[in-house]
Amino acid sequence: MENNDSVLVYGLSTEGYILSNSLVSNSIRTTILDEKLHVATEITPQILSEYSTARSIIEEEALFSIQPEKNAISENPIIFFTPKIRETDDYKKKIFSMVSELSTELSKGAVFFNCVPLGYGQNSEMVEIIERSSGLDSETDFIYSYLPLEPKTNKSITFGTHNLDNKKIVQNLAKSANIKFTQTYDLEISEILHLEKISSLYSPIIAKSESLKKLKDYDKRKILKNEIYYIEDLTNHLSDIRCYTSSLDSGDPSLYMMSGILRSIDSFTRFFIDELKSFMKKNSLKASKTEIYLCWSIDKSEIRGDKVIMHEHIIDKIYDVVGNIKDINDYATTKNGEASYYLPTSDKKQLLILCSKNDEKILKTFKRNLDDNMFLIHANTLCTR
């Protein structure tokens, strides 16, 4: 990267902020754009020291010197596309619309890294959209690369570029953002590798999950001793799965596999709610005399919005069972950067639902221990209790 090159991180997401941190640490002038407010600000070491996460900037409504979106796009030749996507049915439409709009300000010589997951053949569509909206030629005027990131990390799932003659250029730029990758391929191969990795990740999870679902007796489920996965594990790459179910041809065996994974994840909520009802019945917990506390520490600034959407969905389903449901994060206190949790005293029975491995640590920080008035169930494939 030349000394005078500057970078635009398009999207105030957790992943985008991680890349910004790496770029600034490597002495590269970096601007980050809030895709919701359509304004950009230059990221400095001081900002990074005061705001450790994208969420802290959003929540504190930090005020910085800002510049218009169109200037930020036209003045920075290197762009990492990292917006927060919260649509499901209109996922592809939303992404393509955002890229079409920003491409009108794209300058000749731009290098565009798409860090948002797409499906089979959709990156070629993206290149065509950029050409059409910018008037630039993909062979001579700009470089497009596909670099989807794992949630909350700078690790790539795959790495592709539309012209392998530019492989060294995009690899060096990715390294400047400390992005972890192995090899670089053309777009089609990178999409196939993405599909392969998602299939390999979810196949054993779904196989074990479905085995446990068939056993209605909790004691029998424990006998299997399968590896346990939380609802968070199931939703980590839902966007990626949906991308492939919407892009693979009808009759393609890979489509059947992706669709099966999606159906299994969708049915997990029903399975858990049935287990919740059974658990409450066994412990004589009446809906009118029970408070539920959902324990799921979600990063609402991730590129993928799957956890946020699933969080809202599972709350709606639990609400049909018990109307008094609360978020444990509303009962947290922070000291020296460490959060501790408490439950208010109540004459009602209190039921905790843990939704991720990370949230198990919440139990260790309670200011009062679980007692006869408190119950616990895990939203995982075993429904641990």
Image (cartoon, rainbow, N blue to C red):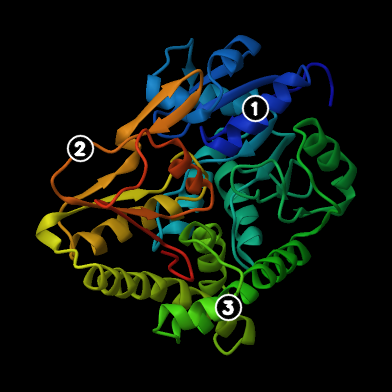
Farthest residue in the front direction? 372
Pair 3/2: label in front = 2
Pair 1/3: label in front = 3
Circle 1 SS class: helix
Farthest residue in the bottom direction? 251
- Residue 266 position in % (x across, y down): 41, 72
Q: At 51% from the left edge and 64% from the top edge, which residue is drawn? A: 234
Q: CA distance from mark 1 to mark 2?
A: 43 Å
Which image quarter: residue 233? bottom right
Please state if 348 lies on the left or on the right of 14 as rendered. Answer: left
User: Do tag 1 and tag 2 residues touch (Cβ < 8 Å)?
Assistant: no
Quadrant, the C terminus? bottom left
Please state if 202 lies on the left or on the right of 326 as rendered. Answer: right
Q: Is residue 258 visible?
A: no
- Residue pointed to by mark 1: 20
Q: Earlier in the sequence, mark 3 or mark 2?
A: 3
The amino acid pointed to by label 2 is Thr
Q: CA distance from mark 1 to mark 3?
A: 38 Å
- Residue pointed to by mark 3: 208
- Residue 190 position in % (x across, y down): 75, 61
Circle 3 SS class: helix
Residue 345, numbered circle: 2
Q: Is residue 38 visible?
A: yes
The amino acid pointed to by label 1 is Ser
